[in-house]
Image (spheres, rainbow, N blue to C red):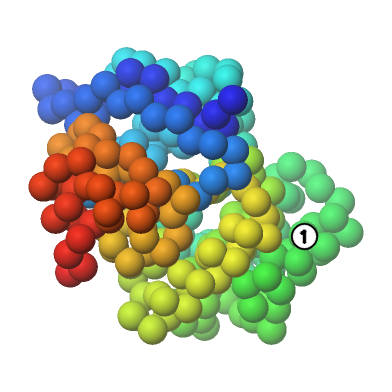
């Protein structure tokens, strides 16, 4: 059974149709990347999966169960955005601990989870700092760490690296790949960066104007693009 499944999903904002009858099945533990030009509906699709936007029609299923009426918390997802969205008045440790505190986890459990995530992301020496005392890359690590601490069933990333410089981006790419191996959790990742898509994905979903052009493994798309659009998008790094 697919871990995350999308059936005949459409989404409109007023008269504007943004997602058009999307069908998609995402395997448990896989790393799936949504690519496509700006405005094609990548973020909207991710937000509908997260439960941050309602579907206009169609279904989102987790483990075979329709989740359309469930909140993001009930869906047990964690989302990491392009802007870091850390709580500015809380330290790194407090930021990372926050969701577990809301769940009334014990102090031992929280300390343990924060320490493990901090170590995974190499921020263990930064735990007492405030977000403003961190670099962009460190902030994004903390944002990812905060997601890990929650032990979500699915990670959703919306262009998490696009505010970082090229060198840091390639290092973080490597670390995300390592993290995925280590956690073996389903990850759904939005980017317009072909290199990120090609290196991170088990499967790439190429979107254009609210519909899926092609789904396939990176090499499959590269070698056998279904059409000129996919060839242009996968084949020509910007
Ligand atoms: P992408 O992430 O691929 O750049 P988005 O999913 O953000 O694309 O947006 C797809 C389309 O939906 C765009 O035309 C955008 O203007 C529109 N859109 C997104 N969110 C809203 C909203 N809340 N209200 C109205 N239009 C929206
Ligand atoms: Mg977007």
- Does any portion of residue 101 appear in the rendered image? yes
On the rendered structure, is 120 left or right of 104? left
* Dot 1 beta carbon under 8 Å from ligand 2: no
Q: Is residue 175 above or below residue 98?
A: below
Element under disc 1: helix
Query: What residue is shown at x 15% (from left), y 37% (from top)?
Result: 209
Question: Closer to the camera, 191 or 71?
Answer: 191
Can you give x and y, in whole percent of width and height, for residue 166 in the image? 33, 80
Q: In the picture, residue 112 is in which quadrant?
A: bottom right
The picture quadrant where one finds residue 84 is: bottom left
- Compared with residue 76, is residue 141 higher up or lower down, i.e. above or below? below
Q: Position of residue 90 (x, y in %)?
A: 60, 67
Picture quadrant of residue 121: bottom right
Residue that protrudes farthest toward the front in the picture: 223
Q: Tell me residue 82's x, y (percent).
A: 37, 60
Q: Residue at the spot x=36%, y=55% of the render? A: 219
Q: Nearer the viewer, residue 168 or 126?
A: 168
Mark 1 neighbour class, 10 Å CA radius: few under 14, some 14 to 19, many 20 or more: many
**In the drawing, does residue 22 fall left or right of residue 103?**
left
Residue name at image x 51 percent, y 72 percent: 174
Q: Is residue 73 visible?
A: no
Task: Give how far across and how far down residue 98 sits, in percent.
Answer: 66, 55
In this picture, residue 136 sits left or right of residue 34: right
* Total count of labels: 1
Q: Quadrant of the C terminus?
A: bottom left
Instruction: Residue under label 1, please give it.
Output: 113
Going 45% across and 60% down the picture, which residue do you hit? 200
- In this rendering, the answer to whether 145 lies above or below 164 is above
Rendered-image quadrant of the N terminus: top right
Q: Left of 99 or right of it: where is 21?
A: left
């Amino acid at each position: 059974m697919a871990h995350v499944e999308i059936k005949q999903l459409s989404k409109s904002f007023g008269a504007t149709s943004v997602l058009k009858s999307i069908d998609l099945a995402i395997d448990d533990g896989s790393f799936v990347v949504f690519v496509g030009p700006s405005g094609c509906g990548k973020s909207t699709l991710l937000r509908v999966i997260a439960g941050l936007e309602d579907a206009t029609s169609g279904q989102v299923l987790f483990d075979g169960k329709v989740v359309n009426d469930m909140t993001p918390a009930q869906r047990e997802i964690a989302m990491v955005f392009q802007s870091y969205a850390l709580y500015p008045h809380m330290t790194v440790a407090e930021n990372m601990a926050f969701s577990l505190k809301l769940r009334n986890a014990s102090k031992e459990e929280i300390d343990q989870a924060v320490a493990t995530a901090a170590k995974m992301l190499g921020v263990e020496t930064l735990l007492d700092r405030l977000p403003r005392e961190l670099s962009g890359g460190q902030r994004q690590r903390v944002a990812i760490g905060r997601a890990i601490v929650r032990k979500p069933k699915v990670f959703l990333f919306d262009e998490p690296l696009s505010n970082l410089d090229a060198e840091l981006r390639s290092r973080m790419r490597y670390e995300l790949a390592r993290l995925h191996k280590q956690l073996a959790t389903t990850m759904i990742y939005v980017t317009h960066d072909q290199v990120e898509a090609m290196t991170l994905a088990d499967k790439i979903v190429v979107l254009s104007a609210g519909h899926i052009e092609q789904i396939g493994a990176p090499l499959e798309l590269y070698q056998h693009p279904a059409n000129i659009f996919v060839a242009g998008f996968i084949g020509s790094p910007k």
